[in-house]
Image (cartoon, helix red, strand yellow):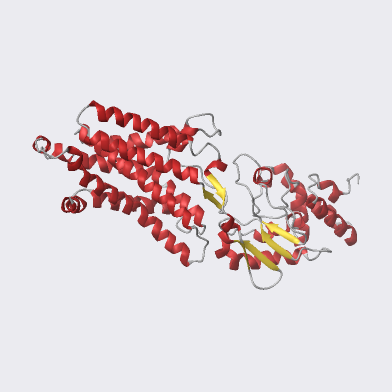
């Protein structure tokens, strides 16, 4: 058996399939602009999402091997041998499994090594994600082999690849727009995590594992079965596995992802004022600290200014469609501390991000933010008429954005002490979760 397996591993299309999956995985990362991803959980998701294209390729690769006996006109000869069909097919099936494992895992291992050399946070549990992906890809290859054995047409490999892609698209799009469904769990294009500290849950991993095991068992039964009994068993197995894989992971983001406490631990830069980021963004600290401290210098113009800056983080998983503050249970800043937002890539407006609303925009309050007042205060602190490059939603409201320069000009026309008093009033009101801040700047407040 081992000699035949080595033969299949070297002489079948398994090596070609491994190279194809490896190239497709790298191309998916490159075309998506994710080769420079610096967040462990984000990279794990992007790598897993490549299975959306790798699964059809695995189906096609299995179908190519499944056609071999009919293509070489050796099917009748091999069928006359006394060896059980399952035993005869097993070396080829195992060779396909090794091929998809190599093609899928090499990309992950390469990316993991690169991330670890940059000092980024990593979690060993996340390694289970690509391992369950191997089960799904192996199952796809075995299903393709069964299809190739059933129909010897050269059109079978491209047809099963297209079918695999269409089914995944169908599972993703079924249901009302914006409302997640259970069938989406059968598509490899899963919803992405929203933040770098969101890790995949055990139930989502279980869904992938059950689906992969179901595809493997179904493919084997269909390929090796000689009568209707194993074929009916294969259909039942696929139905049960598909149902479990669809239901167990749930439908919402907070059933697919969890907050990784280790990824949220704070890592602080040397020097003062103190600047801290989450472990998930630790490799960005050296670049972020100078920009954050620049913002802290502007905040120091105010009395009782904050003396510490900490990256904003949440204690719940973000649910798409809800505001960051109301759906994530965002942490409230400690006294004298600025919360700032830091995405996976440091933007050019990180300093501006710090001074928004006098360092209180990311205040952890549940409710909307007065972005006009927040921008006006930030622009006043930086000596500008308006802030540019800040991606906080104000750009989607041109009429509101036009108000900012006028509010800043009106504020600067006041005596200096009055300017400072109003800006401090906005800061304190924002920390107290007051939503209507603009009247405090314009002097139209009833208080």
Left or right position of 78 against 118: left
Tell how many labels: 0
In this view, the residue in front, 101 or 300, is 101
Q: Nearer the viewer, residue 438 or 367?
A: 367
The residue at 62%/57% (across/down) is 342
Tell me the residue at 31%/35% (across/down): 218
Residue 185, given in percent of the width and then of the height, sits at 46, 37
Relative horizontal placement of residue 329, taking residue 200 as reference (left or right): right
Asked whether, in this view, residue 72 is left or right of residue 195, the answer is left
- The answer to whether residue 415 of the structure is visible from this angle is no
Q: Is residue 216 visible?
A: yes
Camera-side residue: 171 or 298?
A: 171
Placement of 217 over or under 377, stated as above or below: above
Please state which of residues 69 and 22 is positioned toward the viewer in this rendering: 69
Specify the quadrant of the image occupied by residue 127: bottom left
Give the percent coordinates (x, y) of residue 102: 32, 54
Position of residue 28 measured from the top left corner of the image (x, y, whole percent): 40, 50
Name the image quarter holding residue 35.
Answer: bottom left
The percent coordinates of residue 193 (x first, y second) are 54, 47
Q: Is residue 188 above or below residue 346?
A: above
């Amino acid at each position: 058996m081992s000699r035949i397996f080595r033969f299949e591993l070297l002489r079948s299309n398994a090596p070609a399939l491994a190279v194809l999956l490896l190239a497709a995985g790298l191309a998916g990362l490159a075309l998506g602009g994710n080769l420079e991803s610096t967040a462990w959980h984000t990279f794990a998701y992007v790598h897993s999402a490549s299975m959306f294209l790798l699964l059809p390729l695995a189906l096609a690769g299995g179908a190519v091997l499944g056609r071999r006996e009919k293509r070489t006109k050796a099917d009748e000869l091999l069928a006359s041998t006394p060896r059980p069909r399952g035993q005869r097919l097993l070396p080829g099936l195992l060779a396909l499994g090794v091929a998809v494992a190599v093609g899928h895992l090499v990309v992950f291992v390469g990316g993991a090594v690169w991330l670890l050399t940059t000092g980024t946070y990593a979690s060993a549990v996340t390694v289970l994600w690509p391992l369950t992906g191997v089960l799904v890809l192996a199952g796809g290859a075995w299903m393709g082999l069964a299809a190739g054995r059933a129909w010897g047409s050269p059109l079978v490999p491209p047809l099963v690849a297209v079918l695999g892609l269409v089914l995944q698209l169908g599972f993703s799009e079924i249901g009302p727009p914006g409302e997640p469904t259970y069938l989406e769990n059968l598509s490899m294009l899963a919803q992405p995590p929203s933040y770098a500290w969101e890790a995949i849950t055990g139930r989502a991993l279980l869904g992938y594992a059950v689906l992969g095991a179901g595809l493997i068992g179904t493919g084997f039964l269909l390929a090796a079965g000689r009568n209707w009994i194993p074929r009916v068993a294969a259909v039942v197995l696929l139905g049960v596995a598909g149902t479990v894989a669809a239901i167990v992971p749930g439908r919402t983001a907070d059933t697919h992802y969890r907050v990784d406490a280790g990824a949220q631990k704070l890592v602080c830069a040397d020097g003062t004022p103190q600047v801290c980021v989450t472990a998930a963004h630790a490799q960005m600290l050296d670049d972020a600290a100078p920009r954050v401290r620049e913002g802290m210098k502007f905040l120091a113009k105010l009395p009782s200014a904050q003396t510490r800056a900490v990256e904003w983080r949440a204690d719940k998983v973000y649910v798409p469609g809800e505001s960051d503050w109301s759906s994530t249970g965002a942490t409230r800043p400690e006294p004298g501390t600025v919360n700032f937002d830091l995405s996976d890539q440091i933007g050019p407006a990180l300093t501006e991000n710090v001074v928004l609303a006098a360092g209180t925009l990311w205040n952890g309050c549940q409710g909307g933010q007065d972005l006009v007042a927040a921008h006006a205060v930030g622009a006043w602190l930086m000596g500008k008429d308006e802030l540019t490059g800040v991606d906080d939603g104000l750009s989607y409201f041109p009429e509101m954005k036009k108000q900012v320069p006028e509010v800043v000009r009106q504020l600067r026309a006041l005596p200096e002490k009055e300017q400072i008093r109003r800006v401090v009033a906005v800061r304190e009101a924002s920390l107290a979760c007051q939503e209507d801040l603009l009247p405090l700047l314009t002097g139209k407040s009833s208080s």
